[in-house]
Amino acid sequence: MPAMRNQIRELRGRRELTQQELADQVGVTRQTVIAMEQDKYSPSLETAFKVATALGVSLEQCFQYDSRGKR
């Protein structure tokens, strides 16, 4: 089964943002950020762009499509 993978936790750490700070910038809950970081939630395209923008990276640097399936 294909899956989206992301680098949110690593990128957030580089920018020294808390989960709550990222959530506030993106307009989602902290629980949503947690779920995205754990690859348990794939955001909408709009939310994905907001996350990447908040983290100062391109969409491709933040999210990857893994056609081989979940880890």
Image (cartoon, grey):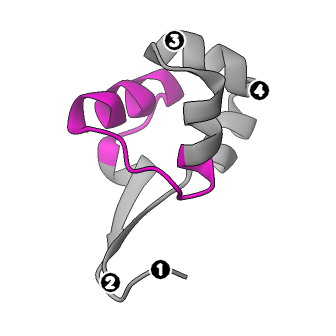
Q: Secondary structure at mark 1?
A: loop
Q: How many marks?
A: 4
* Residue under label 3: 25
In this rendered view, identify the residue nearer to me: 19 or 54: 19
Q: Nearer the viewer, mark 4 or mark 3?
A: 3
Lower position in the chain sequence, tag 3 or tag 1: 3
Which quadrant is home to the N terminus? bottom left
Compared to 61, does 51 lie above or below?
above
Could you tell me the amino acid type at mark 4?
Answer: Glu
Measure the alpha-carbon separation of dots 1 and 4: 28 Å
Could you tell me the amino acid type at mark 2?
Answer: Met
Magenta stretch contains residue 51: yes
* Magenta-tinted stretch: 36-59
Give left or right: position of 28 versus 8. Answer: left
Q: Secondary structure at mark 2?
A: loop
* Residue under label 1: 70
Q: Nearer the viewer, mark 4 or mark 2?
A: 2
Labels 1 and 2 touching (C-beta < 8 A): yes
